[in-house]
């Protein structure tokens, strides 16, 4: 954590006052959106409010989050890497984080497939005849590996290519520790920038309650609920597994691997969860997740600056759950039996597909096309669930970032980089 903590912390992220206001923003957004939707309000005034005011307010909030991501990840990770006293820790940290990210994703998708096979959401589903969905093909694994390394770091930063930014920042941080006096001077500049950008995060988060309100009101005002009727079973199976994974698997791992109180963890995670829910983007939520994990949960920047951006990019348990249920649903709807071998392929394909895919809205469906191809299921089947995907995307994004934070706490505890007093203090960072 930076030594230059600003004195005025009254608007700290996840502070109880701000969290409460964000929750009020969410509830008000839900209420307004549903009223507009249920009363089927149309006409110029409704358009002005929904497509005008709510849209503009929501997009400005999203932009203000996204503008923070690249500078925050770069400076924070450079500082975190440069502060590593022992280089072997970097390898250990990376190894444990990756192992836990893969493990949680594999558990998530296995849970999803089991539930969907038992409940059979797609059995007897009436297939429409006019389905169309064009899937993309997956890039080969070799390309994904080569593309981890940026040829032009400025381009990586400009494109927001998270994995390339992570590689560049780690290399830069390592070089700073090795470069003697010039390295120290360069690091001091980055540390100052880190403090300033953290302040900017806190500043922009003051508008989060209004941003959350606009985003949620707009989604619920425009969501076509007719699409839900035939898909209720699918919707509730995905929702049920998402909730089960969040309330059983993460608390289990936190207790078992790190002896941390899951209830404290969940209380403090409310602000980033609501932001993830309203933006449906783990990437855009990085600033909020990172600050919450450091200030509220007591994880040192050395760990969090690495694990949170990495998790937002490669660890998507919620997405994997949707893919598991969706694959089984599509197989059942088309009356195709992919067998045990098929399901195992799905577990592997979905776990791997989540690596290297950005945390942005709707990307889960693109990855689903890759998974379906692996087991020769019709990619157009995605058209069946498209209409109701936005709401599930919101919930699964909240699960995705909760998984990132849980793994971060476990890894940090194992490294002695989690301050138990901050974790236990309900008002820490507030
Ligand atoms: N929206 C999700 C995220 O950003 C990804 C997805 O499932 O589409 O984490």
Image (cartoon, rainbow, N blue to C red):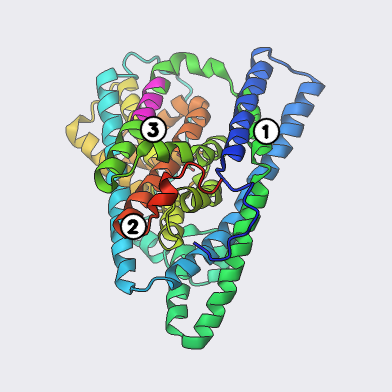
* CB contact under 8 Å: marks 2 and 1: no
Residue 253 percent across, percent down from the top left = 28, 42
Q: Majority secondary structure of the magenta segment?
A: helix
Q: Between disc 2 and disc 1, whose residue precedes?
A: 2
Is residue 238 one of those drawn in magenta?
yes
- Nearer-the-camera pick, 96 or 116: 96
Q: Nearer the viewer, mark 2 or mark 1?
A: 1
Residue 206 percent across, percent down from the top left = 67, 44
Q: Give me the disc on residue 361.
A: none
**Which quarter of the picture shows residue 324?**
top left
Residue 204 percent across, percent down from the top left = 67, 49
Q: Between disc 2 and disc 3, whose residue precedes?
A: 2
Looking at the rendering, in which quadrant would you find the C terminus? top right
Distance from disc 2 to disc 1, alpha carbons, whole Å, reads 39 Å
Mark 2 element type? helix
- Nearer-the-camera pick, 230 or 35: 35
- The residue that disc 3 covers is 322
- The residue that disc 1 covers is 214
Q: Is residue 106 above or below residue 67?
A: above
Mark 1 surroundings within 10 Å by alpha-carbon count, few (fewer than 14), some (14 through 19), many (20 or more): many
Ligand 1 has an atom within 8 Å of the beta carbon of the residue at disc 3: yes
- The residue that disc 2 covers is 141
Distance from disc 2 to disc 3, alpha carbons, whole Å, reads 23 Å
Give the magenta part as a residue range: 236-244
Please state if 309 lies on the left or on the right of 371 as rendered.
Answer: right
For the point 57% across and 66% down, the residue is 155
Q: Between disc 3 and disc 1, whose residue precedes?
A: 1
């Amino acid at each position: 954590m930076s030594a230059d903590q600003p004195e005025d912390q009254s608007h700290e992220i996840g502070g109880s006052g701000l969290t409460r206001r964000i929750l009020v923003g969410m509830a008000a957004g839900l209420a307004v959106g549903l009223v507009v939707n249920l009363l089927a309000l149309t006409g110029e005034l409704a358009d002005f409010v929904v497509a005008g005011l709510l849209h503009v307010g929501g997009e400005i909030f999203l932009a203000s989050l996204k503008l923070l991501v690249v500078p925050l990840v770069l400076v924070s990770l450079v500082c975190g890497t440069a502060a590593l006293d022992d280089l072997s820790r970097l390898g250990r940290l990376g190894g444990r984080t990756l192992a836990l990210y893969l493990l949680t994703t594999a558990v998530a998708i296995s849970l999803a497939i089991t539930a969907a096979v038992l409940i059979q959401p797609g059995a007897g589903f009436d297939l429409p005849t006019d389905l169309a969905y064009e899937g993309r093909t997956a890039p080969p694994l070799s390309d994904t590996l080569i593309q981890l390394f940026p040829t032009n770091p400025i381009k990586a930063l400009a494109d927001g290519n998270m994995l390339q930014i992570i590689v560049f920042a780690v290399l830069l941080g390592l070089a700073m520790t090795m470069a003697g006096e010039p390295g120290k001077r360069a690091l001091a500049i980055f540390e100052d920038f880190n403090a300033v950008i953290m302040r900017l995060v806190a500043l922009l988060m003051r508008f989060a309650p209004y941003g959350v309100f606009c985003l949620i009101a707009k989604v619920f005002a425009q969501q076509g609920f007719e699409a839900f009727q035939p898909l209720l079973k699918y919707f509730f199976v995905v929702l049920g597994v998402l909730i089960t994974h969040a309330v059983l698997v993460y608390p289990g791992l936190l207790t078992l691997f790190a002896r941390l109180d899951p209830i404290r963890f969940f209380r403090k995670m409310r602000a980033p969860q609501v932001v993830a829910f309203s933006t449906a983007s783990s990437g855009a939520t990085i600033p909020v997740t990172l600050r919450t994990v450091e200030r509220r949960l007591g994880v040192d920047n050395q760990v969090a600056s690495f694990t949170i951006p990495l998790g937002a990019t490669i660890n998507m348990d919620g997405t994997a759950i949707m893919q598991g249920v969706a694959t089984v649903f599509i197989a059942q709807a088309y009356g195709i039996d992919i067998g045990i071998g098929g399901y195992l392929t799905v577990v592997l394909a979905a776990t791997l597909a989540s690596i290297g895919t950005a945390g942005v809205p709707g990307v889960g469906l693109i990855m689903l096309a890759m998974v379906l191809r692996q087991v020769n299921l019709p990619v157009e089947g995605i058209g069946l669930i498209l209409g109701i995907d936005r709401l599930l995307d919101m919930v699964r994004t909240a699960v995705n970032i909760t998984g990132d934070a849980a793994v971060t706490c476990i890894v940090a505890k194992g490294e002695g980089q989690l301050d138990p007093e901050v974790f236990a203090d309900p008002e820490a960072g507030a």
